[in-house]
Image (spheres, rainbow, N blue to C red):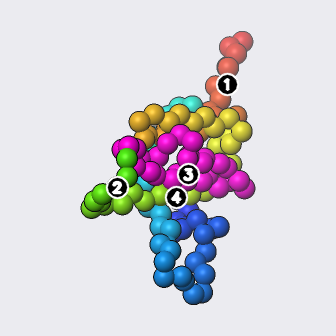
Amino acid sequence: MAEKTVATSPAATPPQTMEGTRTRERYMTPPVDIYEMAEGLVVVADMPGVDSNALDVRVDNHLLTLQGTACHVAPGDVVYREYELMNYFRQFELSDKVDASKIRAEFKHGVLTLHLPKAEVAKPQHIEVRVS
C-alpha cells in the first residue's frame, strides 16, 4: 500500500487573494501503523480530538482517504489557548490485492482502526495433492 502524499484537501484550494479576517484551513498528517496479517492489512491511525461524526473514511478509484475535523471538547468559551487543534488528512493508494468492498473501520478514543482484507485472488491457496 503506497501513500499518496497530499498536503491539503483537494477541495480546499487556497484562493489567489486571501481575506485578512479568515484563517487558512490547515491539515496535519495523522501518524499511522500498518500491520500485515494473513487475512489482510490493518491500519491504525491516531486522530486525537476528532469526533466520530466529524470523521470521513472513503475509497474512490483505489484511493483510501482519511479525513477528520478536530475540535476542543471542553465546555465553555475559550479564554486563553496556547495551541490549536488541526484537522487531519491522509491518502493511501490501494493495490488490486485489497478487497475495497469489504473494508471495515472502528473508531475509539481518537484511534481509527481499518481492516483491509486481501482479495480472494491475492490469498494463498492450498492445493491438495492426491497420492495414487
Are the residues tagged 4 and 3 within 8 Å (C-beta)? yes
Q: Residues within 10 Å of mark 3 (few under 14, many from 20)?
A: many
Q: CA distance from mark 2 to mark 3?
A: 28 Å
Q: Is residue 85 visible?
A: yes
- Whichever of labels 4 and 3 marks the residue nearer the N terminus, that label is 3
Are the residues tagged 2 and 1 within 8 Å (C-beta)? no
Which numbered tag is attached to residue 127? 1
Are the residues tagged 4 and 1 within 8 Å (C-beta)? no
- Residue at the spot x=56%, y=63% of the render? 4
- Residue at the spot x=68%, y=14% of the render? 131
Q: Residue 94: horizontal and vertical position, in percent?
A: 62, 52
Identify residue type, mark 2.
Answer: Val
* Left or right of residue 103, residue 111 in this image: left
- Where disc 2 sits, the SS reads loop
Q: Residues within 10 Å of mark 4 (few under 14, many from 20)?
A: many
Q: Residue 32: horizontal and vertical position, in percent?
A: 43, 49
* Left or right of residue 8, residue 31 in this image: left
Q: Nearer the viewer, residue 5 or 52?
A: 52
- Where disc 1 sits, the SS reads loop
Identify residue type, mark 1.
Answer: Ile
The residue singled out by tag 4 in the image is 89
Identify residue type, mark 4.
Answer: Phe
The residue singled out by tag 2 in the image is 78
What range is drawn magenta here?
A: 47-75
- Residue at the spot x=64%, y=43% of the render? 98
Q: CA distance from mark 4 to mark 1?
A: 43 Å
- Whichever of labels 2 and 4 marks the residue nearer the N terminus, that label is 2
Identify residue type, mark 3.
Answer: Leu
